[in-house]
Image (cartoon, rainbow, N blue to C red):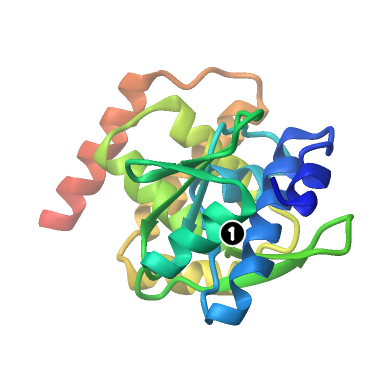
Amino acid sequence: MDERLRSALTTEDATERMLEVAAVVQEALEDLGIHPVVVGGLAVAYWTDGAYLTSDIDVVMPSSPRVDERMAALGFEKQGRFWTLPESDIVFEAPDSVLDPGDEEQEVELRSGRHVALVRAEDLFVHRLEQLLASPSTDTLQQAINLLKAPGLDRARLQARVDDKSLREGLAEVEAFAEKIERGETVETSELHDMERRIRHERLH
């Protein structure tokens, strides 16, 4: 196993440990012109300061035999569409080759001094909101609420992204649920289904 990965795996915090691994992969692929961007649960975990936990590393990057060779050189083993790292619980996956239209990346510096690219918090919120409307769940709602509190969240850009996706009503609903939770009240799954029906009705009329 690459010594940089061995060092990354000693990081105590789980979210930071996975980000360090992603940063090492980013460094290793740089000369190939491959620039992985962390998405999914790990990006949510970073932007919510660990309020959400995940067990894998999802990145957007092209796949190719050269990428497989470089990942193997680092010490990863490919199993189907996943790369695993022996002697660890790390699971690395590239579900897409490019970011969705409108999404942007933001590079952040880790405590080690390494840099890693993540999809922006505003874009993650949009994705979680779309997921919430497609399959209402309190877990997805909580992720969306936590993303609204992300340090450095660009509210103007968030509003533009929400408007672009015709999700203004969804944003308002999530903000209302956030206020309810702040008051110590519980949000039931049935309320989320009611929200989905309201928004669907508004879009049809």
Q: Position of residue 1 (x, y in %)?
A: 69, 45
Q: Residue at x 59, y 56 (%)?
A: 73
* Quadrant of residue 192 within the rendered picture: top left
Quadrant holding the C terminus = bottom left
Residue 60 visible in the snapshot: no
Q: Residue at x 32, y 66 (%)?
A: 165
Q: Left or right: where does residue 16 sit relative to residue 40? A: right
Q: Residues within 10 Å of mark 1 (few under 14, many from 20)?
A: many
Count of numbered circles on the image: 1
Q: Left or right: where does residue 6 sit relative to residue 112? A: left
Q: Residue furthest left?
A: 204
Q: Position of residue 168 (x, y in %)?
A: 38, 60
Tell me the amino acid under the disc marked 1.
Answer: Ala
Q: Residue at x 35, y 74 (%)?
A: 101
**Frontmost residue, 55 versus 131:** 55
Q: Is residue 2 above or below residue 158?
A: above
**Frontmost residue, 182 versus 135:** 135
Residue occupied by mark 1: 121
Q: What is the secondary structure assignment of the residue under circle 1?
A: helix
Q: Left or right: where does residue 110 sit relative to residue 67? A: right
Q: Position of residue 35 (x, y in %)?
A: 55, 73
Q: Residue at x 57, y 33 (%)?
A: 54
Q: Left or right: where does residue 82 sit relative to residue 9? A: left
Q: Is residue 101 above or below residue 153?
A: below
Q: Position of residue 144 (x, y in %)?
A: 52, 43
